[in-house]
Amino acid sequence: MGLIIKFGGSLLFNDDSLDINKSKVMELIKIIQSSQNVQGIVCGGGKIARKYIQAGREMGFDEEKLDQLGIMVSRTNAQTLIYAMGENAYSTPIANLEDARQARKKKQLFVAGGFVPKQSTTTVAMQLCEILECDLIILTDVDGIYNNDPKTNPDAKKFETISYSELESLLRTRTDQERTAGKYQIFDLLSLEILKRSKLRVRFINGLELGNLQCLLTEDFHASKIGTIITP
């Protein structure tokens, strides 16, 4: 089965600045292009998008306009990856599901940013997995899904495996699941609905160390012990 890889735009930048981590971008592309299974990439807006959204909110922009700012930044991130990948990639960021179908017909790797306001890039990735019948790998800045934020709670418990119903309960009870522009955390409820109806498989892994992704792409997706897998 094919794979789609989703990550937040912040993984493209150095920790202490807004400088693009060029060596990491090229390492990521090399790993992805080494696999015959990866069909596409979905990239978020990251730190720069949040800067624009914060400024726009302070200037009184409504949430739809703030989302549009985030979408435009995510597509700039996507286009940067496309240029770096060269002619093997679909030439522009895909903006809808039909673009993804056309990229597959051409046997080209596609890159997407956001699609429409009020929709996370996780939802974009889930929609693409649904129509293309792919598994999903989500790169995050932690090593899986926890019952609380591990950055602030040292007692947070990591799930090796989590079911759809357990994930839904977690999403409905955690207090850090903001759904305003620029703040889509863990796995939003719209993405969960797509997951449940399509019976897709999703694995969360730490994307700060790209060796995790390289290992996962050579292992059995379901049997791997890397990160957290979401299953029915």
Image (spheres, rainbow, N blue to C red):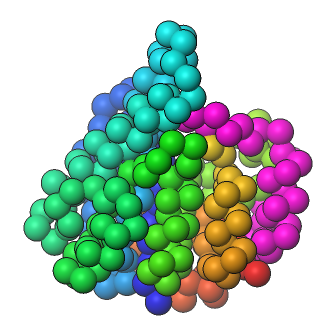
Name, please, the residue furthest toward the left.
87
Residue 27 covered by magenta stretch: no
Q: Quadrant of residue 58?
A: top right
Task: In this rendered view, identify the residue nearer to me: 155 or 196.
Answer: 196
**From the viewer's perspective, is residue 159 above or below residue 19?**
below
Q: Identify which residue is drawn at 43% across, 52% down.
A: 115
Residue 15 x, y percent position in the rendering: 45, 34
Residue 151: percent from the left, percent from the top? 71, 40
Left or right of 26: which side holds 161? right
Q: Please name whichever residue, 212 or 103, is drawn nearer the observer in this view of the structure.
A: 103
Q: Would residue 143 be visible to someone looking at this image?
A: yes
Q: Magenta region: which residues?
A: 154-183
Residue at image location 51% in from the left, 42% down from the top: 117
The reply to whether residue 15 is in sight is no
**Residue 6, percent from left and from top:** 47, 60
156 is within the stretch colored magenta? yes
Residue 4, percent across and down? Answer: 44, 71
Q: Is residue 140 left or right of residue 19?
A: right
